[in-house]
Image (tube, helix red, strand yellow):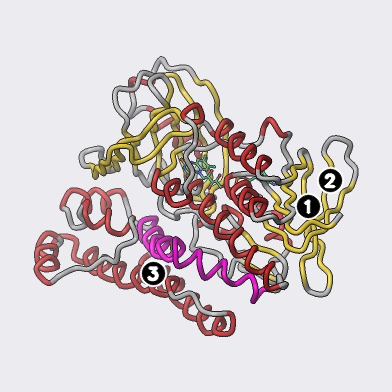
Amino acid sequence: MKYDVIIVGAGPAGTMAAINTAKSGLSTLLIDKEPKDKVGDKVCGNAVSLQHLKEIGLNPPSETTYGTIDSIEIISPDLKNKYRFSAENAGIEIDRLKFGQYLLKLALDNGANFIESVAITSPIIENNMVVGVSGVNLKDSSKVEFKGSVVVDASGAAGVLRKKLHDYVDDTLDDDETMVAFREIRTTRNQDKIFKIFINQQFSPGGYFWYVPMGENLANIGIGVRKNSIDPKFGYREFLKFLPNLKDSKVVHSGSGIVPVRRPMAPAVWNGILFIGDSGFTVDPITGGGIGSSLEAGKIAAESIVKAHERGSFLQDSLWDFSLRYNKKIGHKYASLDVMRIALQARTNEEINFIMRSGIVSQDDLLKVTSGEELKLNFIDAFVRAIAGMRHFSLLLLLLRLVKLSNEAKTLYYNFPTFSEFKAWKEKDLRLHKAAHSQLA
Ligand SMILES: Cc1cc2nc3c(=O)[nH]c(=O)nc-3n(C[C@H](O)[C@H](O)[C@H](O)COP(=O)(O)OP(=O)(O)OC[C@H]3O[C@@H](n4cnc5c(N)ncnc54)[C@H](O)[C@@H]3O)c2cc1C
């Protein structure tokens, strides 16, 4: 049987795409390497902003969550200063397995077909176009093939199809764009609903350490470090010393994972295929949060597939709508945050302590950047900051370069080009990325 749509990976990205293509009447096959009752069970920090859920109109039942997160604190390496962002019910801490099962059920209820325990290994390419996928049935090791009009790679950080198509698509993932993460779920008593982020370039180089309350009696605690820097478990143990109340807590679960943190894949489509979620680099490059954006990308992808189906073509130019719409909605913010990531990863503990202590970058500045607003320094502001920054004048200059480059990145991705204008756009993108590394790192 030939399906209209084949989706590889039943994470947030894949299930959300399946819910929406199936709802639109397209015959949809969703495939995962895990057995059905394990779908969703991923090592994760589990925090999702309610904003993303609102955008797609998803209202998960309360039994799929541990409760709300009311604020986020970012704590300086010397533990003396913090930025705090408060908003009642800013986010929720989900139970990944229950949330994943809820999404899978929605996909099935809308008419999607699901095949469990099949590991897809390759795209099937005919006449320069993806026309299906092949893999292995993990129950009996038999080889399997599925044919479809269009394929979606939603296989997460594994990016199984993307990696096989690197001659045609933007597949690079450098070490600084790869977070190696370790996390534990521990018993503890939580007094508040604060998501705490600790920055420290010695113990979490290029990343951070987090503590997220999971209801009243559990916490999700973890660390992400730049690939090939330190062993994340070493950094994790060092950070635990900052949280003495965890001394007698019990470890309920532990595990590791990879988070790709880079600017969006451009374009995230080729002939007969789209790349969404971690596979299509839709993660926030600063926080490493990718659940909400994967859900949004899944929905946008489904809408673009439906349009392409109506046009009767799944060639790259017909699927282009996905990259245009994703970047207009989310990608431009993450392209700008990626420039910030490059600058932040290269700062020392001393510089970060100074930035947070002096107010050279204020809490408001940070909020504006992370919520996607353009960062502007007015004359008075710049003057006051210059005085505050006398001791670290070079840091002030770096900040000005950062503002310029991150705003440029935002504009570039917001104005994602048409298919025919892409070549010139890509040259600008590569120049900007190179400039961010040479001027900020
Ligand atoms: C330690 C850690 C902490 C994180 N914390 C947070 C957080 O707090 N908040 C947040 O928003 N994000 C967080 N993230 C990122 C988040 O987990 C991902 O961005 C999100 O899960 C991406 O969704 P996805 O659907 O693209 O991929 P996934 O959720 O990874 O799903 C991919 C699916 O594809 C399947 N698959 C993989 N390979 C194959 C194959 N060959 N054949 C068939 N199926 C396959 C997998 O079994 C899986 O079901 C964290 C990540 C890690 C590693």
Element at badge 2?
strand
Q: Where is mark 1, residue-wise?
A: 121
Q: Which of marks 1 and 2 is nearer the N terminus?
A: 1
Residue range in magenta is: 316-345
- Give neighbour class at mark 2: few <14, some 14-19, many 20+ (Cα, 10 Å): some
Element at badge 1?
strand
Q: Where is mark 3, residue-wise?
A: 410
Q: Is residue 312 positioned above or below 279 on the image?
A: below
Q: Which of marks 3 and 1 is nearer the N terminus?
A: 1
Residue located at (23% from left, 66% from top): 394
- Ligand 1 located in image quadrant: top right
Q: Which amino acid does label 1 sit on?
A: Thr
Q: What residue type is labelled 2?
A: Val
Q: Is residue 364 positioned above or below 307 on the image?
A: above
Q: What residue type is labelled 3?
A: Lys
Q: Quadrant of residue 108?
A: top right
- Give neighbour class at mark 1: few <14, some 14-19, many 20+ (Cα, 10 Å): some
